[in-house]
Image: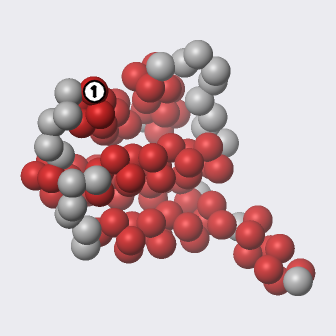
Amino acid sequence: MLISGFIYLKRSKWLPYILIWKYRARNDKETFSKAYLSLLKQLERFGLRKETGQTLREYARNVDNYFGTETMYQLTEQYERNIYRGENIKIDWEQTRELWENLIKKTTG
């Protein structure tokens, strides 16, 4: 039971690698959206919480400022295009998977 508790508490260290493995080989229509939502949950576990009333773009800027990147903003723009415009992200997922993986790996340390 103690070991299970320890593993649960340290999930933010190992879970990103499980998520990368899970989404790497997938390329269906919903892969990018599911991966993006998993990234949001991982960022929250890491300690970067989205404030109430904060837009996804504002949150993405905060994440990018924290990590010194522009990756989250790029991923957020694609997510919004997929959700609000219904654009097909299947081809884009192939191109942006590396960005997503690099950002989610930053939450392990």
Q: Which residue is mark 1?
A: 84
Color scheme of the displayed model: secondary structure
Q: Is residue 31 left or right of residue 11?
A: left
Disc 1 residue type (three-letter): Tyr
Quadrant of res 85: top left
Q: Is residue 58 left or right of residue 32?
A: right
77 shown above or below 18: above
Q: Position of residue 46 (x, y in %)?
A: 63, 49
Residue 78 visible, this angle = no
2 shown above or below 102: below
Farthest residue toward the right? Answer: 2
Residue 5 visible, this angle = yes
Residue under the image location 37 percent in, 37 percent down: 72
Q: Is residue 49 left or right of residue 66?
A: right
Instruction: Give the camera-side residue of 67 and 28.
Output: 28
Instruction: Give the camera-side residue of 105 and 68.
Output: 105
47 shown above or below 22: above
Q: Position of residue 45 (x, y in %)?
A: 65, 50
Instruction: Give the camera-side residue of 106 and 34.
Output: 34
Quadrant of res 61: top left
Q: Mark 1 falls on what kind of element?
A: helix
In which quadrant is the C terminus drawn?
A: bottom right
In which quadrant is the N terminus drawn?
A: bottom right
Q: Position of residue 20 (x, y in %)?
A: 39, 67
18 shown above or below 97: below
Residue under the image location 25 percent in, 68 percent down: 26
Residue under the image location 45 percent in, 46 percent down: 37
Instruction: Give the camera-side residue of 64 and 32.
Output: 32
Farthest residue toward the top? Answer: 53
Q: Residues within 10 Å of mark 1 (few under 14, many from 20)?
A: few
